[in-house]
Amino acid sequence: MVQQEESLHDNWQPLLESLLARGRTAGADLVEIFLEKSDHLGVLAEQDTITSVNPSFGRGAGIRVFLGERDGFVSTNDLSESGLNQSLEQALSMLGLQSNDAERSSFDGLPKLHDFAIAKMDWLKNCPQLKQANERLLNGTNLLARHGTHLQVRRGSYARDWQEVLVAASDGTFGRDIRLHQSMGLNVLATDGEHRSSIGRRYGTSSRPYDLLEWDADGSAQDICESAGKMLYADYVEAGQMPVVLANRFGGVIFHEACGHLLETTQIERGTTPFSDKLNQPIAHESVTAIDEGLTDGAFGSLCMDDEGMEAQRTILIENGVLKSFISDRAGHLRTGHPRTGSGRRQAHIFAAASRMRNTYIAAGPHTPEGLISSIENGLYCKSMGGGSVGPTGQFNFAVEEGYLIEHGKLSKPLKGATLIGEAKEVMPRISMCANDLELAAGFCGSISGSIFVTVGQPHIKVDSITVGGR
Amino acid sequence: MFSEQTIKPINLDSKALRDKLSLFAEREGIRQWDLGAACSKDCSVQVDRGEAKQLKGAQRSSITVRVWNDQGLVGITSTSDLSDTGLQKALIGAYRASDFGNVNDIPAFSSLATAPLPKLDRQLRPAQGIKRLLELLKQAEARLLERHIAIQTIPYNGLAESISKRIYLNSDGALRQIDCTNASIYLYARAEESGRKPRSGGAVRLALGSQDLDIDGCIDEAAELTISHLNYAPIDTGRYLVCFTPDAFLDLIGAFSSMFNARAILDGVSLSQRDSLGSKIAVPFFCLHDNGLHPANIGATSFDGEGTPTQKLCLINEGKLDNLLHSEATARAFGVEPTGHAGLGAKVSVGPDWFEVSSTENLNTTNNHLHHNSFAETFVLIEGLNALHAGVKPSQGSFSLPFSGWIINQGEKVSIEAATVAGDIRTLLNSIEHMEAEQVITHNGASPHVWVNGLSISGEA
């Protein structure tokens, strides 16, 4: 009998083998079981007070059964033996299958557990205590007050997400991992009469229990206050087609939205990517090399194994403008033929894994950021980006949080209210210059398998022409 | 062959839950607590060119426990583990979190947590089962694909049905519970003609049960929209007379709902102030209500996260800010009663239920010639706004949003290839030229078509 408070370890092996054997005996091509325990803490500081402390914890299972290219998926919070059996039966019956105890199983059992978690058992315990987190956040909002002017609202937030997962599948997958993500954010609303600006920055890492204590709150607060001050009196951007330079770090959201999503095999399955038949063909300017990987130490999108039990790897998506690989999960491999890349990811057990990005970035180029700006007569410099999205026909958009006019090769006045829109097929060939200052930034990506931790990144890049929406 | 599968009723006994919590709380010396619980069971299907693609089932449960410690400070903890162990752990976790409760803003039980609830006429509909859902969605997909040769796939589709239960109870004896069923279908088609860019369009329908879904209407709307976008052209950047469809206008007003939110006002992130009630924020013929009890609100519940009854509330009357959305704590701060718009937490969130936009009775403009089906001059009809999460600045009032829609001239309708619309919500609400007579019910509210002049549109021409 498995105890609820126990770790998800190989003591689950007999029950998991029994479930997998029943699924295979029923005629399933493959059965996959994902078990999860989670522990979350969210803290909010406003002005000089902690205003919200939100702890939560959970557990659950997602059971997926494949038959041909179809699959049935059932999730449950009930981790008892009967609860898991019931969920398996439900998933099987969705595909017209029924378990039969009289039949002999073709499943040979699970191998020894591939345990990535063993060295991480003390991670949760080593995270900052609530009192420490509160003090750190209040220090952050205090620093905002020290560095800023006209600040009507100062906020700091801390989130700690701990997750233990155990993945078992009838193809012999049997892996366990512990993941830890922490993020710290500061944001302000500055007001002066009718003028308003809101600026925020987030810092996030994975696998580093002590990271909150190493967060450069002062540097972050100074950066935010400087930007808020500049944007407070900024003019609205004048709309039109123009060249833009996108800053490094979170500027990488352009590649994430404009191209990264379209390289996920789920998009090939749906017929919603223009790149499905472009493998080994040029899809971007020759200056562009793009990578998706799960290996960078401490990065938000890094992982030892994906949510289908496959070890992380480094995948070159585009090399010198030529499409080299797609981002693929188990179902993507089955349905499109593209090999798995360790990219099967999900927010939690309630979602079936899907092909999703990890740390995704454009590689550094030979130019300097100043070189990019000086090459433009009239254009827009996007220092800080908001969120974005991509639609079913490949049209993408994202908001510019902090922009500056480029005039005669130099930065001039601050501009606000810009939204960049375009189509991947058209924009990727227009990324004509990449600088030598690659940096990554933590973010969250919401898609069919929920909201997941990702990294976007790039050096400064120049897009020769893009539609800038404004007033 | 697919097995018949229907969703079984939810077995969560609110009285048993209350008794357990009372016992555990007494054991821990906790005298004041409350709890919100939600459980659901659902199943859904997706198809791809006549074949089942993914079939899903889920059983979900969650509770949030809130406790007051001896100093009167509040802490919470949430969990999906409804076992006895989980409940005890949540209670203890909340008690520990209460050490860090905010002394300046302490929530209390809603004074209306035991007041009579409004009667909701929402029949519980039996589930049809996954086999029937799959049949229906395959048929819907096939019929939509037949509508036009350019419609090649329905990349985003789904049919789902669910049964759910919500509970609120507290240590003062409040006990609220409600059972609901609902179903949804969405169909988003992708169409492409030779040498042209792919275009898309879609529709959504909600109902209390899957047997009640207007699937024909969903197919018709998805087909009509998708086909209407095949004839597209870029638009010149400039200022235009714009007509928002009810869906688009409700999305826009919803994105700026912090204007009516007392929590946001107290936090300093709203465009409104504490003394804004009675001030003019829109044209005199504009009215806005929040009405979670509207018969068309499929997701209606009779109480909020604090057990306060749901009600219809006038937010803007004849262009003036009339009321705000409140939780218990914000209502206390403003000296009014809670309005039934609270979540449950240490810092309680506040949000709208279901907006109804209407014209002031007997007061509209003389611009009756502005009608989206008959107006003869050039205007832009905005059907849907995209990326609201990125392009709206609620605390600043500004928006810059990609949209789908058409430019219409002398009745000729041309889809706009790619464009953004930008403006300021305060200016927009005070620049409404006309509201059409017919109020249209959508899945997230009710509104007529709304006309605004001089909005800035950026295009690729």
Image (tube, coloured by chain):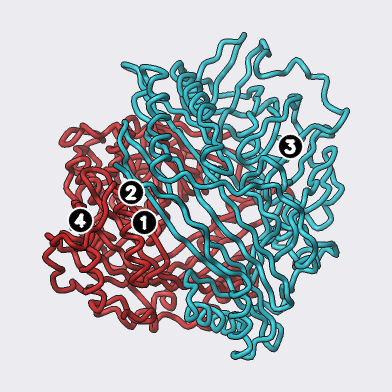
Q: Going 28% across and 64% down the picture, which residue do you hit?
A: A303
The residue pinned by badge 2 equals A94
Residue A31 screen position, x and y as percent: 23, 57
The residue pinned by badge 4 equals A314
Q: Going 34% across and 24% down the picture, which residue do you hit?
A: B152
**Dot 1: element:** strand
Q: Distance between the residues labelled 1 and 4?
A: 31 Å
Residue B214 is at least partly visible in this image: yes
Residue B380 screen position, x and y as percent: 60, 22
Local crowd size for mark 4, using a 10 Å CA cut-off: few (<14), some (14–19), many (≥20): some
Mark with earlier residue (1, 4): 1
**Dot 4: element:** strand
Residue B234, compared with residue B105, is above or below; it is above
Q: Are marks 3 and 4 on the same chain?
A: no
- Of all chains, the one bearing label 4 is A
Closer mark to the observer between disc 2 and disc 3 = 2
Three-letter code for the amino acid on which mark 3 is drawn: Val
Q: Is residue B196 left or right of residue B446?
A: left
Three-letter code for the amino acid on which mark 4 is drawn: Arg
